[in-house]
Amino acid sequence: MAHGGARAQEFGHDAVIVCDNLLRVYQTDTVEVQALQGLDLLVHDREMVAIVGASGSGKSTLLQVLAGVDAATAGRARVAGHDLLGMTRRERVHYRRHVVGFVRQQSSRNLVPYLTAAQVVDLPQSFAGVPRRERRQRTEELFETLGVQHCTDLKPHQMSGGEQQRVAICVALANRPQVLLTDEPTGELDSASAQEVFAALRTANREWGTTVVIVTHDAGVSGQVARTVAIRDGRTSSEVLRSDGAEGVPGIAEEFAVMDRAGRVQVPREFREALALTHRVRLALTEDSIEIRSDRGGER
Ligand code: ADP
């Protein structure tokens, strides 16, 4: 393509999810809340990433922007080649139906009280015009792969919380989206059910190559995924990468600070407090590191 060269220079050109300086401001009569404050994030194809952060840090806002449910105020958000800030209504419908699957926080909002699991997974396929036989095959494949065949003819109130969430994941995956977005998928579950839900997400990631994004306030999730991104005050602040361990042995986790494209790095509070660093610091470049020192002492 003629513009291929220029494209290759773009931030995150090879990523499935690109958030570039994303801003979301909620404006009410009296106050303005900056839920996302220039957030940068790249997620690559077939990655499984957890996004963690305290309540109010902007996780749900980010997920809703990526799901095409909410619109950012400024910046750039692109998912699987779709520019989320410039989508028409029609494109948005296609995007939500085919490109991303979204599992909401409350399992009750993902299912329909009077529909069985088979009926509710059939729904998005039916909207997409998939022939009946193919729909049935896809539903069976999903139930079998995620271990909820026994729920086929059950309604939500007849299933456990973990089963409801796994059926909700089947609904979200029904039309084979490239990206699966989940908001606190294990928030209301005991730890055994939570493990089953994580296993289902990992299976989707592995079996179908779905890129999976899990939003949670539970920092312990980093043991479940290879990459955990922490959000603080509407920005990505640090990442934990975990290498694959041998069978049954957890991999080694390493924490990194995130540097944005302007070179900004957030210094953790414990570090700032230990040296009583305030708004001004001294930076020095050594052979293979950068030192940050207090601005007190040695002043002329
Ligand atoms: P998290 O998911 O990490 O708990 P949210 O994305 O829900 O964080 O919220 C981020 C910030 O935006 C919070 O300060 C929250 O109060 C605010 N916020 C979220 N939704 C709205 C809204 N619809 N109107 C006004 N403020 C909102």
Image (cartoon, helix red, strand yellow):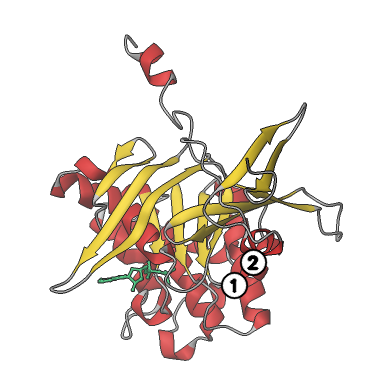
Look at mark 2 in the image and give the residue it sits on. Answer: 221
Name the quadrant of the C terminus: top right
Q: Position of residue 36 (x, y in %)?
A: 36, 57
Label 2 residue SS: helix
Spot the residue most to the top. 2
Q: Where is residue 280 drawn, in percent x and y?
A: 54, 49
Ligand 1's image quarter is bottom left
> Compared with residue 210, is residue 137 higher up or lower down, i.e. above or below?
below
Q: Quadrant of the N terminus?
A: top left
Q: Is the Cβ of the residue at disc 1 closer than 8 Å to that at disc 2?
A: yes
* Residue type of the residue flagged with mark 2: Val
Q: Horizontally, is 208 left or right of 68 in the view?
A: right
**Relative to 166, residue 249 above or below:** above
Residue at image coords 45%, 83%: 154
| Nearer the observer, 223 or 120 | 223
Residue at label 1? Answer: 218
Q: Residue at x 35, y 72 (%)?
A: 119
Q: Is mark 1 on a helix, strand or loop?
A: loop
In whole angstroms, how far apart are the C-alphas of marks 1 and 2? 6 Å
> On the picture, is 169 further left or further right than 29?
right
- Note whether residue 136 is visible: no
| Residue at the bottom extreme of this rendering | 157
User: Residue visible at 39% across and 61% down?
Assistant: 102
Q: Does the residue labelled 2 lie within 8 Å of ligand 1?
A: no
Task: Tell me residue 183's x, y (percent).
Answer: 45, 67
